[in-house]
Amino acid sequence: MSDDKLPFELDIIQYDWLILGTGYEETLYNAHLSKVLKSSNLILDFGNTYSSNIRTMNFKEFHKLDSELPTNQNLPYLHKRPIFTIVDPNQKQQQINQLFANQINSGQEFKHFNIDMQPKLLFSNSPSVSIMQQANLDQYMDFKAVENQFFYDQTTKTFKLTPTSKSDIFKCQFLTLSEKKQFFQLLHTLVKIFHKVINYQIDQNSTQEFDQNTTSLDEETYQKYLQYKDQQAVLFLNEITSKSLNKDKVYAILFYSICFITQSFHNQNNFISTEEFITKFGKCIKSMGIHSKSPFLYTNYGTGDIPQAFCRISAVHGSVFITQSQIRIYKIDKKDNEYLISSNLHQDQIRIKQGIIMCKQIYDSYIQLNQPVINQEHQSKQNYVLMRLILVTTKNQKVLCEEIRSLILDQLIEDQNTQHQLDPSIYVIPCKLFSNNPIYIFRADNNSNSAYKDYELFYVWTLLEEQNQIELKENLKQIIIDIDSKYNEGEEKSINYICYEKVLLQEMNKGEYSFQPNTDENIFVTTEDNDDLDLDAQTKAFMKNVQKVNVNFEENYYMVEKIAKEQQPQEQEMDNQQYILNQLMNIKQKE
């Protein structure tokens, strides 16, 4: 233990709550408890930065990520279970990586990269955005609309704009006239089902396209929905569509490029119920047209800014944060309804009066220390692996050092167009083309403060099954290289030079989840990381479970006190009256 001594010691050793982890969901609980419940919280992260697994890094941090990931060791204290494995690139790419790192890290350019470990998008109209609005997160951060949403057309082997409106559908060149008509009818039917399910009241003044059709859903279709509600969504869609419809093509657009379901609907083990499908469809449709045609927003400076913003809210209300890889918690005891924490943060035990919230990665080590046999059974439940390919690219060969240019000599094109897309974009490749599952590509550059000028970031992710990951990775890299040369119609023909590559394999566990595993203990566990494009699953888990940590919780008061929320309309009215009074005074003075 003497080797684990920290250069500091806590001044206060009594708190209401101990929160282990600074990921998105942990910071939601922390912000609520500190701001709404006025509790004193101690927040510890066994890493050197905030945001845990959805952290955003500058390039220097990203380059040395390999040495900072948790390892699979049995340690005598609480620690994070490793979920990421980094795949070593081939020898040539290793050389390019190191040369580029030397070039970028030698100056100040590395500070202008904001690289996400797990990029997450936000649906414009979603629970996550509602929570952020209630917390006034716009004081700490801002967002960029994802302007373009592309879908890979197998026939022409190019990316096309995803058709989501009447105009888009009838301009679409990869659907036949019959398919366009049936697809449009299907979209409207699904919208009517969604409106019926949520008892949606249509605003007659709305300019949203899918609010214009006010005809009600026919009873026969609704009864079919109720019949198939808990069954596979594909079965229900088969019931309400024509047999002549090219289902593979239309369903692929619906599942992957509108509902953004990350697993193949052909896979019988991937159970997407009709109810879940309609919910995902409705969330996307509700979010379109708010900020752009696409339903998505992306965080300026990266996804990791979201939990950091909630951390700032908590800090303002008195929470104590320590992010330090050398933190050691050796034992958690319970005495007289308090938790006693033996650690290297203080020579005495830290007293926690209310309870402990921890991320799933840390909870696994807690189980290991207390019930090692149960933990062995738990560790065996690994269901699938998500491959995350992160690439730094440029179109301008002049910004590359001579050594890198010599290594990619076969790719170099003289005087090619070096202008690249300025708006964040997302590309979707349906399953059965390069992978058994759909592939998602997210593209960002300095317009969202993601990369230094002249560079772009490409995030590519897909669920792995039986395919060769090395072959898949090389295929995906070639798509990125050629994405503006072969795949984007109407774009200036140019290729992307890959300057840097990193592949993360992320373990995903599916199983029964319990926020409070033992009802006799006030130890609570946040949800496991998932393969969703957005943060709504974690947000909904927080909204569902927050009353367990705040027994006086009142519905919808997640990030604001009830009194404060009730005062807002009154304050607004007072502001309006004061404004009118000032205007009248100005008129009188002029007279």
Image: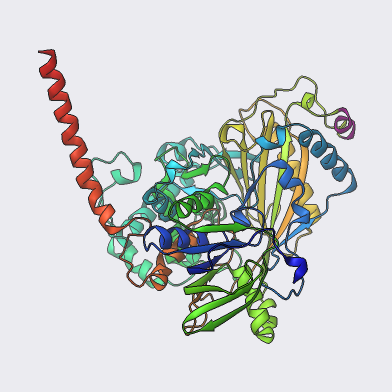
Q: Give percent across and percent down for residue 285.
A: 41, 49
Residue closest to the eye, 376 or 240: 376
The quadrant in which the C terminus is found is: top left
The quarter of the displayed image where residue 321 is located: bottom right
Q: Is residue 48 left or right of residue 40?
A: right
Q: Is residue 171 visible?
A: yes
Q: Residue 503, position in %: x, y?
A: 75, 52
Whole-percent x and y of residue 260? 53, 54
Q: Which residues are magenta?
A: 402-407
Tell which of 432 and 46 is nearer to you: 46
Count of labels shown? 0
Magenta region includes residue 486:
no
The reply to whether the magenta stretch includes residue 403 is: yes
Tell me which residue sits at (50%, 62%) in the image: 538
Rendered image coloring scheme:
rainbow
Q: Write down the quadrant of residue 280 in the picture.
A: bottom left
- Measuring from the top left, give residue 293's x and y in whole percent: 45, 38
Query: What residue is shown at x 30% (from left), y 46% (from top)?
Result: 211
Q: In the figure, is residue 280 to the left or right of 569?
A: right
Looking at the picture, tell me which residue is in the foreground, 388 or 38: 38
Compared to 228, does 264 lie above or below? above
The answer to whether one can see residue 239 in this image is: no
Quarter assignment of residue 370 = bottom right
Specify the principal SS of the magenta part: helix
Q: Residue at x 28, y 64 (%)?
A: 219
Q: Residue furthest top?
A: 591
Q: Nearer the viewer, residue 92 or 199?
A: 92
Q: Please, is residue 400 above or below residue 175 in the view? A: above
